[in-house]
Amino acid sequence: MKDFKSVHEKAKLIYETNKEIYCPYFQAKIILNSDGFNHLQYKPNRVPRNIKEQTLKLILIKKAVEIIPKCGTLQEYRIQIEKYGKPQQSGFYKMKQVQYWGFHAILSDKKHKIKIIIKQVGDGHIIFWSVMPYDQRLYISGIDED
């Protein structure tokens, strides 16, 4: 697997140089922010993902940034109510409606398929949330950086 530190630096640079990406499906800009970047490195319970998984997701950021401007057809959609923010004094959490959109893309090598997840919390910005292999093969074999 690639050197994690160099992959992380390249992914961070891609994030910093592409803060917004126009997506034809939404007819709006998708925001790349720290929430999405952190999600690629940590699971929702803040436990770090294993290095191999992090490396693969960080490598795939470049592919996602190239694919988002071409996304015109939705493959997955989910809407749910989730906890938001920190618990109140009473111990209860505020809840918000969260929407997830999934776009599938076949990579240029024609062998691998990835899934790009876009997220919106309440009426907030639409953000890039995640990128992952469509199946488990890439987790095992990895993928080359371009």
Image (cartoon, rainbow, N blue to C red):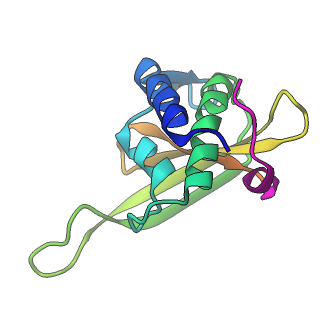
Look at the image and give the residue range highlighted in magenta. 136-146
Point 40% across, 68% down: residue = 45
**Residue at the outermost right position:** 110
Q: Is 111 situated above or below 50?
A: above
Point 63% across, 53% down: residue = 77
Point 44% across, 42% down: residue = 37
Q: Quarter holding the C terminus?
A: top right
Q: Is residue 90 left or right of residue 114?
A: left
- The location of residue 81, given as percent across then percent down, is 42, 66
Q: Is 55 situated above or below 59?
A: below
Q: Is 25 situated above or below 95?
A: above
Give the image quarter of residue 96. bottom left
- For residue 30, say whether it is visible: no
The verdict on residue 126 being magenta is no
**Residue at the outermost left position:** 89
The verdict on residue 138 being magenta is yes
Instruction: Decide which of 48, 3 is in the foreground and name it.
Output: 3
- The location of residue 84, given as percent across then percent down, is 30, 62
**Residue at the outermost bottom position:** 90
Point 52% across, 22% down: residue = 21
Q: Quarter holding the N terminus?
A: top right
- The location of residue 130, given as percent across then percent down, is 55, 46
- The location of residue 4, given as percent across then percent down, is 54, 41
Q: Is residue 7 left or right of residue 135?
A: left
